Image (spheres, coloured by chain):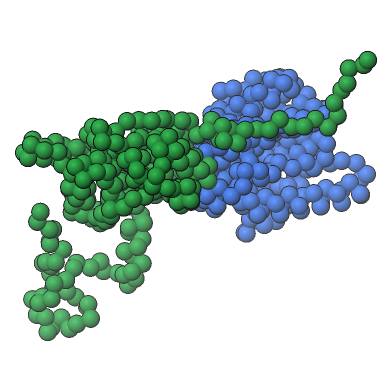
Amino acid sequence: MSIFEYNGSAVVAMVGKNCFAIASDRRLGVQLQTIATDFQRISKIHDHLFIGLSGLATDVQTLYQRLVFRHKLYQLREERDMKPETFASLVSAILYEKRFGPYLCQPVIAGLGDDNKPFICTMDSIGAKELAKDFVVSGTASESLYGACEAMFKPDMEAEELFETISQALLSSVDRDCLSGWGGHVYVVTPDEIKEKILKGRMD
Amino acid sequence: MKLDTSGFETSMPVIGFGSNSEMLDGVSSVPSFDLPRTTDFDGFQKKSVEMVKPAKGTTTLAFIFKEGVMVAADSRASMGGYISSQSVKKIIEINPYMLGTMAGGAADCQFWHRNLGIKCRLHELANKRRISVSGASKLLANMLYSYRGMGLSVGTMIAGWDETGPGLYYVDNEGGRLKGDRFSVGSGSPYAYGVLDSGYKFDMSIEEASELARRSIYHATFRDGASGGVASVYHVGPQGWTKLSGDDVGELHYHYYPVAPATAEHVMEEAA
């Protein structure tokens, strides 16, 4: 098993009508053994920007702390929140700085930009940005997630329907992966509010 | 049964194995094995075994108690990280009074258990009496020993009831055969042993024993990534085996640990 599969993870983000949803599994494992079932993979940068990190858990935590630090500095200097596109470029630059000793994680960035237009993107572990209009996935269950999202996604879904779709896609994909699952964590973000939900999934 | 001694005969003289080739002069007086030509002999052996050995990703267990033998297993098949099936039958019915469990390569276990069933039936026809559990496990162990080192992956338990009472044997692809009261095999076995060993008593009723078996499998599926699906529990008694239950472990979790409804921080009161 490769180092990306050491801890196990699954992250997915989807675009809706003036809203987005980002979801992850909750397992932290050491190869096949499950250590925790409440691991935080998705973190808030500001009210309209979330980042989900899959891959090696220690790098997930360190990279998140570094990004929060950089964003706070930006807020102090610019006296405003970062736009999602700018943040994506920041993450890409930070990852490429470590080109020859990379952070072993794949981020998924989701945010609401100007005019509340949803923005999602994913990157590989050295910062190659991949923008998408519909959904992005990463983690050990990524192949199953691609299949599930492709089948279930419809454009311009409202928040309620988007929540159902992303939850079903996440749960059905992690049920085909030994290394991720044990519950789900979903954030649905509209211009006015953030809804956070925990999913009841198979615990095997 | 003739032991396979072909490993002791070499067709070519031993070269560079700590003794002078001139002295041996093409005739090996000491029994020796063909050795691979490599600088790191120990590492090479280990690497080749690891290469062909698929991990036994599963949890199976069996134990003897007052009322017979309880056998339980999960139902997940995994290929590396991918779950290829959640509904594999890992408890194989060799004949109406003997069960075998499957851990390791699915094809290997299915084939050799069927082969064992054939041999047991032939024994019955030749000797006009059923084969004992000890005899059946010995047949399997000897078959597997002759294929030792060829990459078979079988970690099985043979459980049955014969004239001497309940019998339980562990047999694996290395040719090992152990008689015992409690076994668990597979990647989830440490977790199952934890629950099984702490809850085990010889004087249990069938319901208590089946609940212990079910709980052990459930806990193994929770902690082990390579175990999951359905926890099947079988009982072998004097009349043969019966399947007691097959519970989905996803549902078992919420049965054992129901989700407590979250307490609301602010409750809206009806205006009087």
Rendered-image quadrant of the C terminus of chain B: top right
Residue toward you, B15 or B158: B158
- In the image, A112: left or right of B232? right
List x then y, in percent, for residue B83: 46, 37
Give the residue displayed 93% in from the left and 44% down from the top.
A79
Q: The green chain is which one?
A: B
**Above or below for A158 versus B213:** above
List x then y, in percent, for residue A103: 65, 54
Residue toward you, B77 or B253: B253
**Above or below for A155 versus B167:** above
Residue toward you, A70 or B205: B205
Q: Which quadrant would residue A148 be assigned to in this image? A: top right
Give the residue displayed 69% in from the left and 25% down from the top.
A163
Q: Which quadrant would residue B270 be assigned to in this image? A: top right
List x then y, in percent, for residue B33: 18, 68
Q: Which quadrant would residue B15 be assigned to in this image? A: bottom left
Give the residue displayed 35% in from the left and 30% down from the top.
B243
- In the image, B74: left or right of A138? left
Q: Is residue A145 visible from the viewing direction of this image?
A: no
List x then y, in percent, for residue B125: 8, 35
Rendered-image quadrant of the N terminus of chain B: bottom left
Q: Is residue B219 visible from the viewing direction of this image?
A: yes
**What shade does chain A have?**
blue
Give the residue displayed 88% in from the left and 21% down from the top.
B269
Q: Residue furthest top?
A: B272
